Image (cartoon, rainbow, N blue to C red):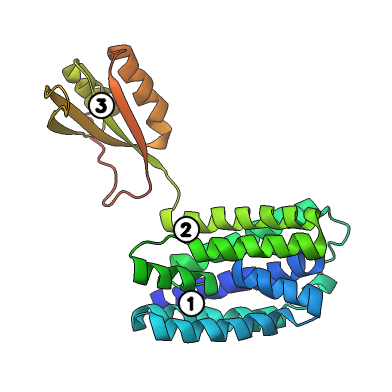
């Protein structure tokens, strides 16, 4: 059942990407990043079918993956790299079914970017690669030890430069919007959505702050004994994780107790075993 759910999510992600490419991008000469941008440009300029360009490029990147990457990473390419061109072929006439010709091109760009970005998220959540850009990043990390994305940035910049030359500044600007939207949404897949905050607090009124967190808000906390790096003075750091909904309540409560308290607040994208809530006695 778990595997079935996984493959359904991958299928949904690939379908969203293929449909959006055909509906929003190829019809309007808007070019997203990487392989999809190159394939969309080849269709717009040379009338090479989108699905065919993606299929040929994907075959090349699967070959590169099997040459340069460990086998466990190579397996992340095969399913999605096969599905996306197939689904691009199946959805190639989606524009005749869903007529959006009268829709403003900026809206098409934004909606296309959002849908492709969501497709990326479904696939990334299941630990699969979406396109050749992911293979390039993986190879880069394999050899340098860091995911720098330099090659992908150069490819995206080249796509924009070619777009300016062949289609004009306006189309390049729309393409840049699509790239930013897709990148923003797809990157959120690896981090998730921050629904909790981590507070680090240094205060001279640590007892009062502790009492407020435990008794008023009902959350647990951890106490660290630390020493300053410059003055070597000893301090106590209080650390607690709370839901985002109580963010302002805790922040303002600490300020009321100690206006000079040092507070560092960071996003928490995942809390294993849940936030510890103290059950108050009735």
Q: Disc 2 or 3, which lies upstream in sequence?
A: 2
Quickly name the residue at label 3. Answer: 201
From the viewer's perspective, tell me whether residue 231 is left or right of residue 202: left
From the viewer's perspective, tell me whether residue 275 is left or right of residue 140: left
From the viewer's perspective, tell me whether residue 36 is left or right of residue 153: right
Q: Disc 1 or 3, which lies upstream in sequence?
A: 1
Q: Is residue 244 above or below residue 182?
A: above
Quickly name the residue at label 2. Answer: 189
Q: Residue 259 at what x, y percent from top left?
A: 32, 12
Q: Closest to the observer: 180 or 254? A: 180
Identify the disc placed on residue 7: 1
Dot 3 lies on which element?
strand
Question: How crowded is the residue under tag 2: few (<14 C-alpha within 10 Å), some, or many (20+)?
Answer: some
Q: Residue at x 19, y 15 (%)?
A: 205
Eye-nearest disc, 1 or 3: 3
Q: CA distance from mark 1 to mark 2?
A: 17 Å
Q: CA distance from mark 1 to mark 3?
A: 44 Å
Question: How crowded is the residue under tag 1: few (<14 C-alpha within 10 Å), some, or many (20+)?
Answer: some
**Which quarter of the rendered picture does the N terminus lie within?**
bottom left
Tag 1–tag 3 contact (CB < 8 Å): no
Q: Residue 261 at what x, y percent from top left?
A: 28, 18
Q: Disc 1 or 2, which lies upstream in sequence?
A: 1
Q: Residue 223 at what x, y percent from top left?
A: 15, 32
Q: Is residue 195 above or below residue 38?
A: above
């Amino acid at each position: 059942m778990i595997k079935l759910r996984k493959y359904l999510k991958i299928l949904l992600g690939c379908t969203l990407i293929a449909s959006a490419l055909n509906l929003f991008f190829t019809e309007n000469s808007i070019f997203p990043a990487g392989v999809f941008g190159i394939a969309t440009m080849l269709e717009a300029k040379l009338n090479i079918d989108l699905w065919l360009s993606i299929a040929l490029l994907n075959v090349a990147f699967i070959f590169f993956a099997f040459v340069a990457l460990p086998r466990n990473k190579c397996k992340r390419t095969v399913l999605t790299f096969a599905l996306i061109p197939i689904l691009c072929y199946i959805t190639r006439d989606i524009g005749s079914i869903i007529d959006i010709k009268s829709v403003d091109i900026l809206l098409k760009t934004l909606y296309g970017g959002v849908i492709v970005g969501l497709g990326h998220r479904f696939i990334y959540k299941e630990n699969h690669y979406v396109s050749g850009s992911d293979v390039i990043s993986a190879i880069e990390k394999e050899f340098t030890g860091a995911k720098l994305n330099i090659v992908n940035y150069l490819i995206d910049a080249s796509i924009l430069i070619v777009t300016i030359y062949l289609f004009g500044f306006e189309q390049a600007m729309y393409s840049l919007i699509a790239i930013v939207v897709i990148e923003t949404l797809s990157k959120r897949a690896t981090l998730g959505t921050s629904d909790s905050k981590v507070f680090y607090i240094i205060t001279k009124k640590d007892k009062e702050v502790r009492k407020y967190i435990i008794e008023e808000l009902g959350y647990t906390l951890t106490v660290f004994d630390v020493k300053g790096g410059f003055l070597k003075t000893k301090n106590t750091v209080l650390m607690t994780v709370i839901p985002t909904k109580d963010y302002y309540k805790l922040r303002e409560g600490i300020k009321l107790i100690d206006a000079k308290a040092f507070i560092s607040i960071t996003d928490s994208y995942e809390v294993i075993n849940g936030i510890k809530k103290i059950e108050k006695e009735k």
